[in-house]
Amino acid sequence: MAMFLTIKVFLLKPNENSKKKPSLKLGKRLQQIEKMATLEEYGHIWDCCCDHGLLGCALLNRQAEATISDTSSNMPVNIVSNTARNKDSDIHFVDIVPELMAELASKLHRFYSSSLNAVIAKNWQTHCLDVATLPLDRYDGKHLVIIAGVGGDLMIKFIEAINKQHNNLAIDFLLCPVHHQFTLRSKLIELDFSLKDEVLVEENQRFYEVLLVSSSSTSDSRENSKVSPVGDKIWQSDSSTQLTIDSSGLSIKNSNEHTIKVSLSQAEIADKYLNNTLNHYQRMQKGFQQSTEQGNQRVKANNVNPDVQHIIDAYRTVTLPILVS
Ligand SMILES: C[S@@+](CC[C@H](N)C(=O)[O-])C[C@H]1O[C@@H](n2cnc3c(N)ncnc32)[C@H](O)[C@@H]1O
């Protein structure tokens, strides 16, 4: 509720608020995803599995902010939106739960349709459907499909279905799985997707990989690289630039013995994430070995403890930058 009140204030007083970013309460994970969605590049951005639509609303607000700051340069809205800026992206909210979508649609109507800027008011749509059946071919322009907050295994099903149904389109996907990252990356490699960017985020002591990939491996992708099964850039971040003061961070003392709060540096996040990931797969491998020794057919048949030695070997090849204390 607080989120939408903020939007309302922002939209009703564009001149006073044109320089302020509306304060949607996104966590670090959603903030990172939002940052990697470049509005200018896409005609259509699909916030899939959107739940309450926080991410899509943040994108709409970013668009509103850009348009309002354009209008404050004394140009009429219709001229600004058609000439000074590229066409705005349409934001599509997608979820499979009808009640969620009905509630979201009513909130969006209330807070965006009354917008002073008629362009923004038309820039969103809700779709109550299975992400596997996205109707991308009904809309012209480049698509960015964002899927976050579900497992990598479900994401694979969505991506395979979308890719199969729209194999003539070059589609970018912005993905943030809650688990099964290795399996997802392996599938992206199998589908010959290319990597545009990847970032590792920590939020509430959980780690998230955010991957921006393209279904196109050749055209328009000279700057893209290959997807690595364990990640590449996510391990190489420069620790010194990432140290930020953050009340949720660790408590340390500076040279004057004043206690200051800092968040984990990016190098520490990478180090912890690698340890956690290796520990996780080592525990699974132990389970696999025990079930094999015991000849437990039921466990093996249900694939409860699969052989993950190849995953452990792959993560062991990761080299981290040296941590400077
Ligand atoms: C945990 S929420 C993720 C919310 C948000 N994307 C995030 O990252 O915080 C997962 C959402 O996925 C939706 N969902 C699950 N399966 C789906 C499907 N096949 N198609 C569309 N939405 C689905 C659920 O209804 C739920 O709202």
Image: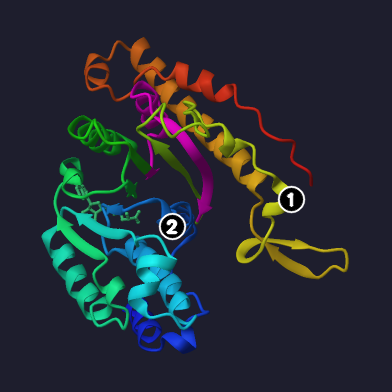
Q: Residue at x 41, y 34 (%)?
A: 181
Q: Nearer the viewer, residue 244 or 264?
A: 244
Classify residue 127 by image quadrant.
Answer: bottom left
* The magenta segment: 174-203
Q: Which mark is residue 13?
A: none
SS at mark 1 in the image: helix
Q: Is residue 321 left or right of residue 44?
A: right
**SS for callout 2:** helix
- Residue 307 in sight in this render: yes
Q: Is residue 121 magenta?
A: no
Q: Which residue is drawn at 46% across and 75% down?
A: 70
Residue 244 drawn at (x, y percent): 67, 61
Q: Distance between the residues labelled 2 and 1?
A: 24 Å
Amino acid at the residue labelled 2: Glu
Q: Which residue is drawn at 19% across and 61% down?
A: 126
Residue position for label 2? 34
**Residue 177 visible, this orientation:** no
Q: Are marks 2 and 1 in contact (CB under 8 Å)?
A: no
